[in-house]
Amino acid sequence: MIQKTKGARSLAFTEAPCILGSASVAGKKEAEGPLGDCFDVTGEDDLFGEKTWEAAESRIQKEACILALGKAKIRAEQVRCLYGGDLLRQGIATSMGAEELQIPMFGLFGACSTSGEALALAAMAVSAGYGEYMLAVTSSHFGTAEKEFRFPLSYASQRPLSAQWTVTGAGAFVVGSRKGAVRIAGVTVGKIVDYGLKDSQNMGACMAPAAADTIACHLEDFGREAQEYDRIVTGDLGYVGQSILLDLLRERGIDIGGLHLDCGKLIFDQKAQDTHAGGSGCGCAAVTLSAFILPKIISGEWKRVLFVPTGALMSTVSYNEGASVPGIAHGILLEHCPDWKEEG
Amino acid sequence: MIQKTKGARSLAFTEAPCILGSASVAGKKEAEGPLGDCFDVTGEDDLFGEKTWEAAESRIQKEACILALGKAKIRAEQVRCLYGGDLLRQGIATSMGAEELQIPMFGLFGACSTSGEALALAAMAVSAGYGEYMLAVTSSHFGTAEKEFRFPLSYASQRPLSAQWTVTGAGAFVVGSRKGAVRIAGVTVGKIVDYGLKDSQNMGACMAPAAADTIACHLEDFGREAQEYDRIVTGDLGYVGQSILLDLLRERGIDIGGLHLDCGKLIFDQKAQDTHAGGSGCGCAAVTLSAFILPKIISGEWKRVLFVPTGALMSTVSYNEGASVPGIAHGILLEHCPDWKEEG
C-alpha cells in the first residue's frame, strides 16, 4: 500500500488513488473574479434559493457532491465514506448538506485546511482497499463566516488591510481506485504550529509557519528539491501570508518563489474587488483546486503539484480568552497520469 | 487488510489493531458518581489548575493522552497521527490540547459520537499499515458545553427532565499493530439519521434512531445475532433515548434488552446526582470506555462488545433557525484477545 518515505509524516502510495471527478459551486463575488469562468456553477445571490446563509452553504455542499459524482459517473450509493467539513460551529453546513446523500460519514474540522484533511483521509482509505470510491467535500460562505467569527454584516465594520475575504463556495472530489487523469501520489499530514500570534484579522501570518513546516517536511520526506514540482499551491495565505511563507522557507534554504501560488490570491482581483489580503475559508482552496488547478494537471500542463491547504485554529471564544491562533497545513501530492485516456 | 462483510458500511480487519493503552481524566461530579473509583485521574474542581473552562478541557485532553502513551509504553514521537475532537465551536479544546504533543493531527467533529469516529479512523490507519501507533482522543466539559450550547451557569436555568448533563472528562486511546489485550476487530461507519426532532433538550430521542440504524446494520453486515455479543454499549442516549432505542430495534426484530448498557446511564447516579436523563458529551463515552468497559474486556469477563457512541448534530445557530437535530452513531467492535499476555 505504501512506500517508505524518509520521515514519519508523509505517506507515498504504491497504488495511488485518483481524483475521478470534482466540482465547484461558488458565489456571486467569486463569479466576478479572475476564476469566474472556471466554476461549474455560480449563484446569482449568495442564498442559492434558501432562506438562510447556513442552509445556502449546506445546499452548495450537496450540489458540489452531486456534480462531482456525476462527473465520476457513479451514484451516491457506490461511495463508501464521505469525509467533509466546514468552518461553522459544530460543522452544521456539512451535517445538513451531506444528510440527504445518505453516505456513511466522517465529519472533520481543520479550519481552512479541511479540504486537505478530507483528501488525505479519502486517499488513505482508498489506497488501503477500504472501498472503491470515497467523497471529500468542504465549503465556506461569506455570510455564515462573518456571523460566526466577526460582526453582523449590517454593522459595516471596517476591515484592516491584513484581513481576508471568506470565499462562498464548495468543492467536492471523488477519490477512487479506478485509473484517472490525476493521482494522489502521497500525503504529508500537518502538525499544529504556533508562533504565538493572536490577531485573527491577520490569519495569513498565523498560518504561514504551518505551511512552511509542511512544505519543508514534504520535500525532506520525499527527498526532492522544490524545483521538481511544477507548482506549490497553498490554500489561503493571501498576500501577507505569502511573503512570510517565502521568507520562512528561504531561511531553511528552500526557494519556492518561482513556483508558489496561493488560492487566496488567485480567486479575487485584490484591487477591483476590494478584498484586502485575499480570499480565505475552506471553500477557497477547494473550489480553486477543482476549477483551476486540476484542469492544468489533467491537461499535463503541470505534471506534479503540491497542494497545501492551510488552517487557522481559533474560535471567537479562544480569541476572546486571549489564546493564540496556531496554524495547520496538510500537503497533498498531485500528479498527472500520462497513460490515462478517458473511455468512450 | 480487510475481510468482506455482507454490507458496505462495515469493515472487518484481518489483522486487527489493538488498544494498547487508554486513560480517563474526569471531573468532580464524575468522581462522585458510580464510576468514580475507576478513573485514572479526577479533579477537585473542574478547572484543573487553569483559568478558563476551555483551557481546563484542553488540559485534560493532553493529560489523558500523556497517561495513555505511558500505559502503552511509547513516546509521543512514536505516534504517527492523532485523531481528536470535542464539542466546542471550531474544536478548540483539541487544537489547544494536542498542540504540545506535536503529533501530526486530524481534527474531527461527530458531536458525542466523536470517540467512535476517532477510534474507527485510528484503527483503519493502523490496519492499513500507515503507522505502528495512532492516538484517538476526545473530551467534553460541563462548563464549556453550557456556555457553548445553553445558558450561562449563573442564570440557574431549570432543565427539563429529558435534558442530559454534559460529562467533564477526556479519554485517550493508543491504537497499534502490536498485540494487546483488546482488539478492534471491525468498525461500522455511521450515517446521518434524521427523524425530524427539533428538541435540543431531548438529545437522547434525537440520537436513538441513528444508534438503532448502526446496530442493526452492524449485526446484518457481520451476519450475527445480538446474543453473540456480551454487551452492546451506546454512548449517551440516557434514560429517554435507551427506551426509544430498544423499541426501534424490537420493531426490526432485534432484542438487545438484556445486553444493552448506555454510558450516559452508567456514569451518574440519576437520583442522588440530579442528572435527569443521564450523562452526555463526547467525554462521556470515552471515559466510560477507558475506565469501565475496557477493563472488563481485558479481564475476559466480556469477550465481545459493540461500542456505539452517538452524536446529535446541531449548533445554537441551526437550533435557532429551526433546523432538526439529526443523529449519527459509529460502531466499534471490541474483542478480548485470549492469547495475549503482558510482557515482563
Image (cartoon, coloured by chain):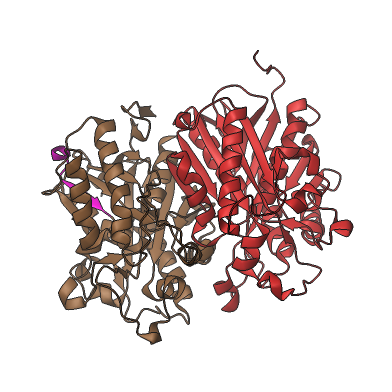
Chain colours: A brown, B red
Q: Residue furthest right?
A: B271
Q: Residue at the location (72% across, 20% down)?
A: B338
- Quarter of the view holding residue B207: bottom right
Question: Is B85 displayed left or right of A235 in the figure?
Answer: right
Q: Identify which residue, B141 or B10, lies in the foreground.
A: B141
Residue A67 sits above or below residue A270 on the image: above
Between A113 and A2, the one lying in front of the other is A113
Q: Is residue B177 above or below residue B166?
A: above
User: Can residue B224 be spotted in the picture?
Assistant: no
Q: Quadrant of residue A338?
A: top left
The answer to whether A35 appears left or right of B280 in the picture is left
Residue B317's spot in the image, x, y percent?
55, 74
Magenta stretch: includes residue A25: no
Residue at 47 percent across and 31 percent down: it is B128
**Residue A148 versus residue A50 in the image, above or below:** above
Identified at 51% across, 30% down, the residue is B133
Residue B201 shows up from this direction: yes
Q: Quadrant of the N terminus of chain A?
A: top left
List the single residue furthest toward the top.
Answer: B344
The magenta stretch spans residue A232: yes
**As rendered, which of A297 and B102 lies closer to the eye?**
B102
Q: Give the magenta-colored segment's residue range.
A: A226-234
